[in-house]
Amino acid sequence: MALRELQPSPEALPVYEPEVRIFLTPEGVDNFAASKVITLLQNEPSAVLTLPTGSTPREMYWLILEAFNRGEVSFAQATIFNLDEYWPLPPQDPASYASYMRTRFINHIDIPRGNWHIPNSAAEGANEEATRFEALLQQTGGVDLAVLGIGPDLTCHIGFNEPGSAVTSRTRYVELDPRTLVVNQEHFPDPSQIPSGAITQGIADILEAKRILLLAKGGGKARGIARTLKGPVFAEAPASFLRYHPNVTFVLDRDAASLLKTNN
Ligand code: GLP
């Protein structure tokens, strides 16, 4: 969708009922997400993808790698944009999203080095780096599929678009929500070393993807998913903005979906 054309009245956007797929197990979520990525690339080898990090998509990457190793899928013509990255942080830090992507995925597939983009966590200026990344994103001619996770607790963040993010937001530097800092610091050997900020694709960038999958697994995501799907569409739950998009699928395991019925 061309969000730019709809400004400055995003509140006038139509709200859609997203597709919700609920699987009995987390493996169901992993298989569904991996198969969507694989099928897209089989049909459109030069597809542009926006991809997430976090614990939720780990098994998705593993399954895609298995398919790659069997020769069923190639990234030779694909382009990948990551959703977000901490700033500032040495890119080689094991807790950086660049390290996550390299070790779990990028180093093992045939994507040309220039076709994978992630904000540079060691850039001198976060705003300048955000502008550079946004320009690259705009040059691609559009993202075919964006795969997202959802933030902890009731943050309902997507990428690092924390509560308060505008629907019109673009790639930028953000301060992390205190709830995000508490949960994400467990990925840092020294929890006090977690950066207080990050560079993230904006909500408008995410909404411009042709198709969006949001993955959530486990009971810890249940309240956030219920708020996102059953609460108001508003900046306090940035994932709720996905209801402005006509082609979104929420891919949930039974635990993540457990509060959907009672929150009607
Ligand atoms: C981080 C990332 C998000 C991700 C979220 C969920 O905060 N910035 O893009 O969706 O974590 O992480 P997990 O999958 O580990 O729950």
Image (cartoon, grey):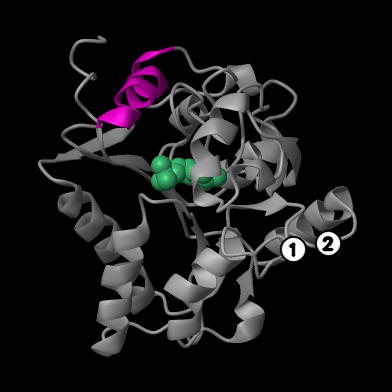
Res 38 quadrant in image: bottom left
Farthest residue, direction left: 24
The secondary element bearing badge 2 is classed as loop
Asked if residue 225 is among those painted magenta in the image, a careful observer would answer yes
| Residue 17 seen anywhere in this rendered image of the structure | no
Q: Which mark is residue 182?
A: none
Res 219 quadrant in image: top left
Quarter the N terminus occupies: top right
| Residue 184 seen anywhere in this rendered image of the structure | yes
Count neighbours of disc 2 (C-alpha within 10 A) and say few if under 14, some if 14 to 19, many if 20 or more: some
Res 145 quadrant in image: bottom left
Quarter the C terminus occupies: top left
Count neighbours of disc 1 (C-alpha within 10 A) and say few if under 14, some if 14 to 19, many if 20 or more: many
Q: Which residues are magenta?
A: 219-231
**Badge 2 amino acid:** Ala
Q: Which mark is residue 123?
A: 2
Q: Foreground: 223 or 168?
A: 223
Farthest residue, direction front: 190
Percent position of residue 133, x then y: 75, 59
Q: At 66% across and 34% down in the image, what residue appears?
A: 176
Does residue 259 appear to the left or right of 8 in the view shown? left
Does residue 57 appear to the left or right of 195 in the view shown? left
Asked if residue 228 is among those painted magenta in the image, a careful observer would answer yes
Can you identify the residue that label 1 sits on? 120
Callout 2 touching callout 1 (CB < 8 Å): yes
Q: Is residue 206 above or below residue 224?
A: below
**Badge 1 amino acid:** Asn
Does residue 119 appear to the left or right of 31 in the view shown? right
